[in-house]
Amino acid sequence: MSLPDGFGVPPYGSATLADVLPSAASALGVPVHRGDLPVDPLDLTAAVAGARRVAVLLVDGLGAELVAAHRGQAPVLNALGTPVGTLSAPCPSTTPVSLVTLGTGLPPGSHGVLGFVTAVPGEERTLNHVHWDDDPDPLRWQAQPTVFEQAAADGVSCTVVAPHAFAASGLTRAAYRGADYASAFSPGDLVAGMHAALRTGERSLVYGYTADLDLTGHVRGVDSAAWRAQLGIVDRLVEQLADGLPEDAVLLVTADHGMVDVPETTRLDIGAEPGLTEGVRLLAGEPRARYVHAEPGAADDVLAAWRAVLGPRAWVVSRAEAVDSGVFGAVDPALADRIGDVVALARGSWAITDVQRDPFGSMLAAYHGSLTPAELAIPLLAARGRALR
């Protein structure tokens, strides 16, 4: 199944977010296992040479194109080393999918967190992976071992420094199990917490997460004074992290996805188009990456209707076509039903909103989730402790 012009298939196993932690852990001497994928695809040996401690900071929403376009607001980010160039986010290019992809070192088709919201197979309900406690059980819903578990088993001190509100969430347990969780209550607390965690043990792997840039982009847009000001705050945070690194540490900075502004003129409300609701049992995903679950026997009709209504505004395919395209990586057959009978990934600046069931989510200024370069391209930047420079 060929993709539309401008769409890309994430190259899992060579240059994606899934490859960051396996390569970082391998550089610390950890024997990482990730099925048929290469163990150390990014070969960070040169970037991490001599280091006994690696910190990975994920800035939610920090697309590579956005970094390059804002050199004035992000001088530190633009001055950092680029050990392997630009990476790709997974598909869909959205936070829960990306965080579990990072934590497991596996594509979405292997770990099973396949969307922001997905159907729970066999039940007439959906799961929002951001608002997820223990139903379904995170250890069953995402059963693959994490890179943190493998590193901890090899004697590496593993710590996640992230917002206190996420400490016990299902997503945290799916993505980060095996690491100690250190709550951060502010950007300064995040910096101090990562510095402290890096100094534990003979080898340490520390992961930090900050969400404010993504939130600002969603609410105000990436072409806004608010977003540019927030990028400057991120730049200062990274500068403080780099300046305070232990001498034998390396900092890697990456992201989970980019983002695109969506004007009012490129929004299509599902409820306003009768052809998009007929035969639909459950609607999942998000505005730029929709999963449509059809009533029994209606999948072909729903696919035809969504193709007819959306036309060039989205890549609309069946589940089988989406799986065969490789955008999710190799998909475990036991997990395939979490993907809709119909998959619709928005093209250009289009968003497929649902005003009646998700009024707030339909009013945002910017979105992500699809396969455009602005959403997929993410940075991998590096800074080294003084003794390693």
Image: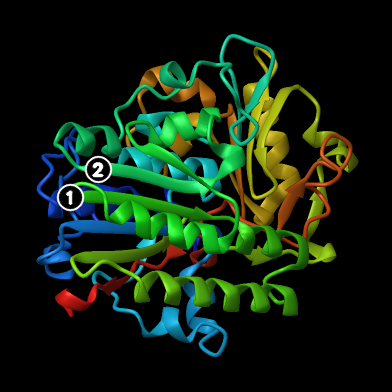
* Amino acid type, residue under disc 1 in the picture: Arg
Compare residues 322 and 146 and report the one nearer the observer.
146
Coordinates of residue 388 in the picture (x, y in percent): 16, 75
Residue at image mark 1 = 203
List the single residue furthest toward the top. 122
Coordinates of residue 181 in the picture (x, y in percent): 43, 39
Q: Would residue 355 be found to the left or right of residue 386 on screen?
A: right
The relative height of residue 153 versus residue 254 in the rendered view (above or below) is above
Name the image quarter holding residue 312: bottom right
* Residue pictured at 30% horizontal, 55% vertical: 198
Q: Is residue 269 visible?
A: yes
Assess whether mark 1 and mark 2 are in contact (beta carbons under 8 angstroms): yes
Residue at image mark 2 = 157
* Residue pictured at 73% horizontal, 35% vertical: 305
* Amino acid type, residue under disc 2 in the picture: Ser
Circle 1: element type:
loop
Coordinates of residue 231 in the picture (x, y in percent): 59, 74
